[in-house]
Amino acid sequence: MSDTSVPTIGYYRIRGLAQPIRLLLTYKGVKFIDKFYGKSGAKTFDEFTGVWFAEKTILGLDFPGIPYYMKGTFKLTQSTAIMRYLGRKHGLIATDETGLVRQDLLEQQLTDIWMSFTYGLLFNKDYETLK
């Protein structure tokens, strides 16, 4: 039986979208369980995603997806929603309108940078050489 007082972060066996969540929890000194999906060294998409696809419909998530955050009966998906929730919970969110607007802007700017980097790497014709 798992400890429901310790949150669980579920994600593939990569840093990806779950890494900022892990970093935030670590920064705040929160112990958590890292639930990894996918075989290490998987050679096919099915090997990488198979366990997650089998498990996602039985976890009771409103919108089954990863990363997910679970603590007791509280369950949340979507990396940005999780980060916002944890930011509020741990006092890491702006408290005035100007700060909130700047925070929203920074969030979206970081998303644009992340997506440009990811797509630029994954869809580059020289991907194998660059990785």
Image (cartoon, rainbow, N blue to C red):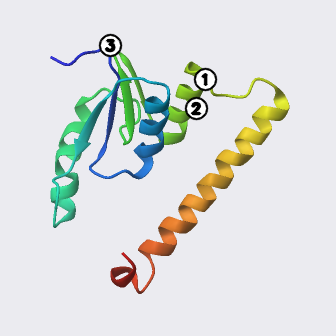
Residue 46, x across and y down, in percent: 17, 59
Question: Which numbered dot is residue 79?
Answer: none
Residue at coordinates 31% horizontally, 26% vertically from top-left? 60
> How many callouts does the rendering have?
3
- Disc 1 crowd, CA 10 A, few/some/many (<14, 14-19, 20+): few
Question: Hey, which quadrant is residue 67 in on the image?
Answer: top left
Residue furthest to the right in view is 98
Q: Is residue 98 above or below residue 31?
A: below
Q: Compute the Cα span from label 3 to label 1.
A: 19 Å
> Mark 3 highlights which residue?
5
Cβ–Cβ below 8 Å for labels 3 and 1? no
Residue 8, x across and y down, in percent: 32, 28
Query: Callout 3, which amino acid?
Result: Ser
- Disc 3 crowd, CA 10 A, few/some/many (<14, 14-19, 20+): few
Cβ–Cβ below 8 Å for labels 2 and 1? yes
> Mark 2 highlights which residue?
84
Query: Callout 1, which amino acid?
Result: Arg
Question: Hey, which quadrant is residue 25 in on the image?
Answer: top left
